[in-house]
Image (cartoon, grey):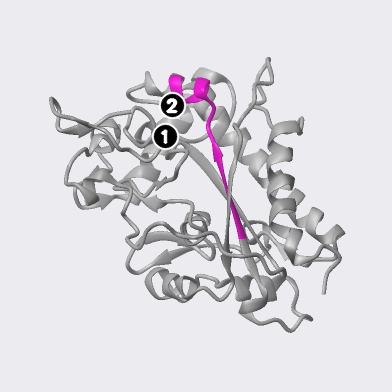
Amino acid sequence: MNALGNDHAETWIRSVIQDYIRDSPDNHLNNADRERAFDAPLVGFAHGADPLFNDFKEHVGSFHWTPREAFSLAFPSQTVSAGELTVISWILPQTRATKADNRREVRFPAERWARARTFGEDVNAKLRRHVEQALERRQIAAVAPMLAPQWARKTSERHGYASTWSERHAAYACGLGTFGLSDGLITPLGKAMRVGSVVARVNIPATPRPYSDHHAYCLFFAKGVCGRCMERCPADAITPEGHDKVACKTYIRQKAQPFIKRTYGFAGRGCGLCQTKVPCESRIPLKESSRTKQYLP
C-alpha cells in the first residue's frame, strides 16, 4: 500500500513536522534578526472515519469537507474509503518573546505578534506542503486541505464566517484541544498558537481525546469563572454569548491592519490580544486565584 509501513508512520510523521520547525530556515519572523516564528510543535492524529467529521458538516454546514471529501478532490482517480485515511494535525506555539510582547498591548498587536500571524502563517503553509511532499516521497497520497485550490470561505447559517475546512476543528478531532469563549482552541501548549493539518492515505492510531465536551478546557464554560478574553478584546467582540466574528474581522481589517502597516512598515494582519495575558495563553488553565476568582497563568 505504501513504502513506509504503518507501524512506523506515526513516529516518522511526528519527526517530519518537529524537525522542520526545529531546523528549517523558513521558521522565522522575517525581521532583521530572523527570530524563530514558532517553538516545538504538538502533533495529533484522527481516523478519517471519525464520526466527528460528519458532526462538523452538520453543525458548520454541508459545505464543510470530511477527510474523504478533501482527499477525493485532490485525488479523484483514487477510490478510497474514509477508514483508509488519517488526519494529521499540529499546533505551532508562539514563542515566549512573541507572547510577552503581545501581553503588554491593550489595543493593537505587538510587532512580533503581527509578524507571527503574517509571516508565521507563511511558515505554516510551507510546513503543510513539506508534509505533503514528505509523504508523497514515501508513496503515500496526501493533501493539505487549506492548500487545495477548491478551499473556500463560506457562510454558515449557525456560525457566520466559516470555510470548507477548519484547522481548529481538525485539531479538536485529533485530541489537541477544545474551544474557548473567544473561539480560540485551548491546547496543552495554550491558545497562543497557529494550527495546520494534512489528510493522508495511511493508517495511524488516533490520538486519544481526553475530553467529550468541546468547551472542556475553557474556564468560563467549565467553571463559570474567568472571561479574561472579554476584557482583552479591543473590539468588544467577545461577550458571555460568545465571539462576534463580524466585529472581530471588522476591527482587524479597519483598525489593526492599517496600524501594522503604518507603525511596523509591512502589510500584516492579526490582533491576538485575546490569546495573550489570559489563563489559557500557554497551557490548559488549572489554578484558581481566590482573590480574583479567576484562573491565572
Vertical position of residue 133 compared to residue 262: above or below:
below
- Residue beneath the point at 20% across and 52% down: 241
- As measured in the structure, the alpha-carbon distance from the residue carrying label 2 to the one carrying label 1 is 7 Å
Identity of the residue furthest to the front in this view:
7
Does residue 230 show up?
Answer: yes
Helix, strand, or loop for circle 1? loop
Magenta highlight range: 88-100
Vertical position of residue 152 compared to residue 291: above or below:
below
**Are circles 2 and 1 on residues that touch, CB within 8 Å?**
yes
Q: Quadrant of the C terminus?
A: top left
Determine if the magenta segment contains residue 93.
yes
Q: Quadrant of residue 143?
A: bottom right
Q: Quadrant of residue 162?
A: bottom left
Does residue 261 show up?
Answer: no
* Marks 2 and 1, the one that precedes in the sequence: 2
The residue under label 1 is which amino acid type? Gly
The residue under label 2 is which amino acid type? Pro
- Residue beneath the point at 71% across and 52% down: 11
Label drawn at residue 272: 1
Residue carrying label 2: 109
- Residue beneath the point at 44% across and 20% down: 100
Question: Viewer-proximal residue, 118 or 224?
Answer: 224
Q: Position of residue 211 (x, y in %)?
A: 37, 58
Q: Position of residue 294 (x, y in %)?
A: 20, 33
Helix, strand, or loop for circle 2? loop
Q: Position of residue 51 (x, y in %)?
A: 47, 76
Vertical position of residue 49 compared to residue 27: above or below:
below
Question: Viewer-proximal residue, 6 or 43?
Answer: 6
- In this rendering, the count of numbered labels is 2
